């Protein structure tokens, strides 16, 4: 039986609820924590949120390319339905690099997969994939405003360095109360559009895109 995109959306939503519960619990003790302890917890939350988003989009692409169904039950047609998962991953990698797909080889390993959560690469994959829901995925991804800043924050945290920190500091112009003692502090910046934490903006934007992509 073909897999529905709703399966991936529902799994993602459970993960987001669990993570946000953890984030809210952290906020109750954060003011009393040392910087090292506070940063360690936030790094775990931010990294896991990023990975959840990446896994969701990866699953949507693989299911769509394999001939799954939309959330509404429509069959997704695909020119790649006969390919193996490894071959579809190779196609996605080529598309993410804006390279021509001239053969259907297997990808050499997970380390060569595209950065699934990167919006620019995700749009390139979605628009280039020969799947009937391609335009739906592109429209869903076009809703992303804050997710690129999640990627910047995650990279500044996971690959701590001057260049990454500069990119994160440059993102502060979009938010308020942007004190930064550690890159992980970005999750508690305030989004002026909602007057809530940037973490909540990230989560709500991921949910919105997931709803639309899975419809």
Image (cartoon, rainbow, N blue to C red):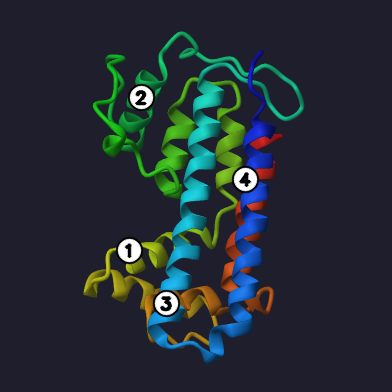
Determine which residue is flagged by label 1: 158
Q: Is residue 143 above or below residue 41?
A: above
Q: Secondary structure at mark 4?
A: helix
Q: Earlier in the sequence, mark 2 or mark 3?
A: 3
Q: Secondary structure at mark 2?
A: helix
Q: Nearer the viewer, residue 76 or 52?
A: 52
Q: Give the Cα separation between the discs numbered 3 and 4.
A: 24 Å
Circle 2 crowding by C-alpha within 10 Å: few under 14, some 14–19, many from 20: many
Determine which residue is flagged by label 3: 39
Q: Give the Cα separation between the discs numbered 2 and 3.
A: 37 Å
**Which quadrant holds residue 84?**
top left
Q: Quarter of the image containing the C terminus?
A: top right
Q: Nearer the viewer, residue 212 or 89?
A: 89
**Number of marks in the rendered image:** 4
Q: Earlier in the sequence, mark 4 or mark 1?
A: 4
Q: Secondary structure at mark 1?
A: helix
Q: Is residue 175 above or below residue 67?
A: below
Residue found 62% across the figure and 51% down from its top: 15
Which of labels 4 and 2 is toward the front? 4
Judged left or right of residue 55, residue 87 is left
Q: Give the Cα separation between the discs numbered 4 and 2.
A: 24 Å
Determine which residue is flagged by label 2: 91
- Asked whether the beta carbons under mark 1 and mark 2 sit within 8 Å of each other, the answer is no
Q: Give the Cα separation between the discs numbered 4 and 1.
A: 22 Å
Circle 1 crowding by C-alpha within 10 Å: few under 14, some 14–19, many from 20: some
Circle 4 crowding by C-alpha within 10 Å: few under 14, some 14–19, many from 20: many
Determine which residue is flagged by label 4: 12
């Amino acid at each position: 039986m073909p897999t529905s995109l709703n399966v991936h959306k529902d799994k993602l939503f459970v993960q987001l609820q669990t993570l946000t519960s953890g984030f809210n619990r952290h906020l109750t003790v954060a003011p009393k924590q040392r910087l090292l302890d506070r940063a360690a917890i936030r790094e775990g939350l931010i990294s896991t949120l990023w990975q959840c988003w990446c896994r969701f989009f990866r699953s949507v692409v693989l299911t769509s390319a394999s001939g799954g169904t939309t959330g509404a039950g429509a069959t997704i047609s695909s020119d790649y339905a006969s390919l193996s998962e490894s071959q579809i991953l190779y196609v996605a990698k080529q598309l993410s690099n804006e390279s021509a797909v001239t053969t259907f080889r297997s990808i050499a390993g997970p380390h060569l997969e595209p950065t699934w959560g990167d919006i620019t690469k995700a749009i390139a994959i979605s628009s280039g994939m020969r799947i009937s829901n391609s335009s739906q995925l592109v429209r869903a991804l076009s809703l992303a405003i804050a997710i690129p800043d999640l990627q910047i924050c995650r990279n500044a945290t996971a690959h701590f360095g001057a260049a990454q920190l500069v990119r994160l500091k440059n993102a502060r112009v979009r938010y308020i109360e942007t004190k930064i003692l550690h890159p992980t502090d970005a999750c508690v910046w305030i989004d002026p559009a909602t007057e809530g934490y940037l973490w909540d903006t990230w989560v709500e934007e991921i949910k919105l895109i997931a709803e639309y992509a899975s419809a």
